[in-house]
Image (tube, grey):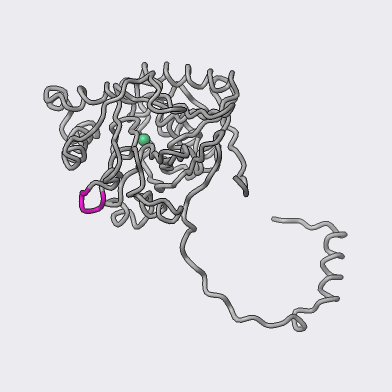
């Protein structure tokens, strides 16, 4: 219950006396809009312009952490004032304009899911248009790894290339794993892994397998360098965008929802293919981000996914970058 002090009550009484409701001009009730604003946010990295473009949010059951109980996961969500009945992940792709090239990194879950989820996810293409970016003007799409939330947006709702004029860059170590039939046959029937094998073949066949393989650890174009961050998938790759003295680490899925996996870097989400390797990568990257005070862009961070990292207890905590009304 809210308790007002005597002084606060006196002030309230005075205001009421001075401006009784009956003397205020009458307005007609405005109808509620009932729709969220388009999700995009811009910031500069040196002379490069980054546009963060929201794809949406999607929920998963609590039992998708291998080495934590549902109760522990629920408690961590409650501690962050999030829905403690389910894990709700944001999906946050970005677009980089270098001045000479327009580059998408990880185009989200794709417009097919938009209808199915009543608009909760699959917003990337519509938010891209709302941000004033034409899909046909995109020169390059860089993929971090082969999970549906990072590759499905390569296609339109009718399975046509969504970025018809773009070169599609994929991490070289991902390809042989996902295209190996014996790997696919070993994936348990009905598992998320099996779904991913089938989904990757569907998406990249629709593109005629026209992709360029890139090696982690290489500069892909001036100011965008790939970094091997394996574990989440065999060839999972992050990117550093650098221009002038500015830098941002675009981590993809090194850590998923921060309230769970940044606070508890030792927790192993079932989405991580090789959990021990993923944890090693996570700790190495987060130690580096904290030591270098380096800006982080997180694909599964709350929109717009920009934060700094500090060490905290046995894990880390993220300090979100405040919304900047100018660029
Ligand atoms: Zn992901």
Question: Between residues 238 and 34, which one lies in front from this camera angle?
Answer: 238
Residue 159 counted in the magenta span: yes
Which residue sits at x=19%, y=32%?
197
Relative image position of residue 109 (x, y in whole percent): 32, 44
Q: Residue furthest front?
A: 100
Q: Position of residue 237 (x, y in %)?
A: 36, 25
Quadrant housing the C terminus: top right
Magenta stretch, main secondary structure, is loop
Residue 98 is inside the magenta segment: no
297 lies left or right of 63: right
Above or below, 272 relative to 157: above
Residue 283 vertical position relative to residue 321 in the rendered view, above or below: above
Residue in the picture at 35% in, 30% down: 144
What percent of the width, then of the height, locates residue 157?
Answer: 25, 53
Quadrant of ligand 1 in image:
top left
Q: Which residues are magenta?
A: 156-160
């Amino acid at each position: 219950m809210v308790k007002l002090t005597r002084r606060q009550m006196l002030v309230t009484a005075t205001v009421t006396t001075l401006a009784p409701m009956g003397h205020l001009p009458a307005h007609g009730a405005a109808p509620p809009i009932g729709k969220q604003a388009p999700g995009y946010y811009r910031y500069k990295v040196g002379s490069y312009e980054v546009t963060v473009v929201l794809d949406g949010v999607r929920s998963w059951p609590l039992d998708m952490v291998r080495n934590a109980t549902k109760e522990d996961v629920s408690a961590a969500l409650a501690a962050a004032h999030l829905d403690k009945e389910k894990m709700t992940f944001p999906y946050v792709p970005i677009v980089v304009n270098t001045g000479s090239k327009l580059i998408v990194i990880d185009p989200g879950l794709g417009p097919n899911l938009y209808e199915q989820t009543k608009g909760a996810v699959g917003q990337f293409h519509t938010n891209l248009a709302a941000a004033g970016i034409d899909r046909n003007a995109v020169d390059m799409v860089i993929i971090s790894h082969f999970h549906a939330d990072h590759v499905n947006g390569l296609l339109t709702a009718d399975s046509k290339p969504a970025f018809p004029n773009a070169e599609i860059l994929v991490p070289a170590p991902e390809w042989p794993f996902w295209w190996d039939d014996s790997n696919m046959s070993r994936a348990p029937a009905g598992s998320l892994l099996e779904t991913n094998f089938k989904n990757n073949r569907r998406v990249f066949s629709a593109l005629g397998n026209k992709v360029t393989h890139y090696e982690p650890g290489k500069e892909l174009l001036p100011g965008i360098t790939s970094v091997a961050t394996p574990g989440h998938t065999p060839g999972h790759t992050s990117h550093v965008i650098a221009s002038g003295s500015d830098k941002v680490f675009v981590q993809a899925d090194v850590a998923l929802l921060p309230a769970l996996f940044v606070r508890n870097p030792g927790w192993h989400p079932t989405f991580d293919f090789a959990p021990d390797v993923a944890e090693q990568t996570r700790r190495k990257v987060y130690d580096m981000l904290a030591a270098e005070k380096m800006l982080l862009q997180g694909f599964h961070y709350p929109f717009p996914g920009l934060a700094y990292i500090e060490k905290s207890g046995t894990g880390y905590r993220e300090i979100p970058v405040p919304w900047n009304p100018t660029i």
